[in-house]
Image (spheres, rainbow, N blue to C red):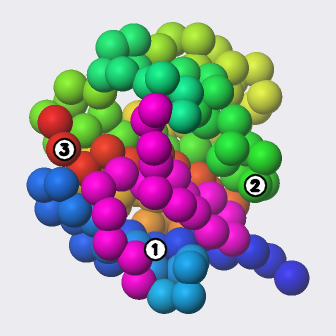
Amino acid sequence: MDVKSPQILSLAWGEMQVDGFEGGVVTGKDFKLFPGGGRQWDWTETGMRHQPGIQPEDVQELLDHGATVVVLSRGMDLVLEVDSRTIDFLAAQSVETHVAETRAAAARYNELAASDVAVGGLFHSTC
């Protein structure tokens, strides 16, 4: 049986609504989404900061849950960076990667999830 990725229902500054895990619709600021589920994204787990940005350890959980395509958001004002090591890490594992401003990233992620692609993503709903 195929495992679907959750859908992003709405996105505004500092708030996202996601459906498809934890028994229904969940509201939060930042999310890690992957096939079969997701959770709120706690940056302190890996010590992530806006610079140098998303690290390989931040995306590993997405791959562990079966993501073959990854969407990374850079924030609403493109302040969040993506470390080049992360892009290299994903490329070395043949993972298709999309990096975009959060609204564009959410739209791309939802398109992929609706097409039953094993997509995962990291979403930051501010700066």
Q: Please provide percent x and percent y for residue 16.
A: 28, 65
What amino acid does circle 1 point to?
Answer: Gln
**What's under tag 2, amino acid-wise?**
His
Q: Residue at x 64, y 27 (%)?
A: 57
Q: Residues within 10 Å of mark 2 (few under 14, many from 20)?
A: some
Q: In the figure, 86 relative to 126: above or below?
A: above
Near-viewer residue (90 or 58)? 58
Residue annotated with mark 1: 7
Disc 2 target residue? 65
Say left or right for 53 vs 33: left
**Does residue 41 appear in this view?**
yes
Quadrant where the C terminus is found in the figure:
top left
Label 1: state its secondary structure. strand
- Above or below, 20 against 95 in this view is below
Q: Position of residue 108 (x, y in %)?
A: 40, 56
**Over which residues does the magenta segment extend?**
25-44
Camera-nearest label, 3 or 1? 3
Q: What's the distance in space between the residues labelled 3 and 2, CA to CA? A: 26 Å
Q: Would residue 28 be counted in the magenta stretch? A: yes
**In contact (CB < 8 Å): disc 3 and disc 2:** no
Mark toward the start of the polypeptide (3 vs 1): 1
**Dot 3 amino acid type:** Thr
Q: Residue at x 33, y 14 (%)?
A: 51
Residue under label 3, please give it: 126
Quarter occupied by the N terminus = bottom right
Give the quadrant of residue 59: top right
